[in-house]
Amino acid sequence: MPPVPMTITDAAAERVKAMLAKRGKPSVGIRIGVRSKGCSGMSYTLEYADERSQFDEIVEDKGVIVLIDPKATMFILGTEMDYVEEKMQSGFVFRNPNEKGRCGCGESFHV
């Protein structure tokens, strides 16, 4: 059985559902990728997905569809996507077993 590309917590699934409902136009789901940024090298990207690319990795879990950009798959294989609400900030959190380190501000990572 191939490894699971990504898991989604209940909190992340609920937040994605709320985001898609507020968007005001139909979406396939959300797309996750990585890009070069920050002092550690890479950061996660998250955007609405209007259509599926033939090369996207597709994760359907807890009633949401997450498309993984094919260029990001090798960097986020096995990652857990969560949504955390804290007193000072809230947002998606990625627990990635491939990370070798993060920058001090938490904006970027390297593998």
Image (cartoon, rainbow, N blue to C red):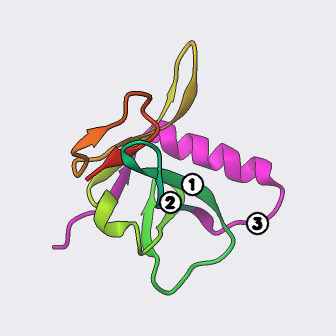
Residue 63 x, y percent position in the rendering: 52, 56
Q: Using the numbered discs, state the Cα–Cα distance from disc 3 to disc 1 in whole angstroms.
A: 17 Å
Image height check: is 87 above or below 97?
Answer: above
The residue positioned 26% from the left and 56% from the top of the image is: 78
Secondary element at image label 1? strand
Closer-to-camera residue (5/46): 46
**The disc label shown at residue 104, or none:** none
Residue 18 placement: quadrant: top right
**Dot 2, crowdedness within 10 Å: few (<14), some or many (≥20)?**
many
Residue 62 x, y percent position in the rendering: 46, 52
N-terminal-most mark, 2 or 1: 2
What amino acid does circle 3 point to? Pro
The residue positioned 30% from the left and 49% from the top of the image is: 110
What amino acid does circle 2 point to? Ile
Residue bearing the label numbered 2: 32
Residue bearing the label numbered 1: 46
The answer to whether 77 appears left or right of 84 in the picture is left
**Dot 3, crowdedness within 10 Å: few (<14), some or many (≥20)?**
few
What amino acid does circle 1 point to? Leu
The residue positioned 27% from the left and 63% from the top of the image is: 4
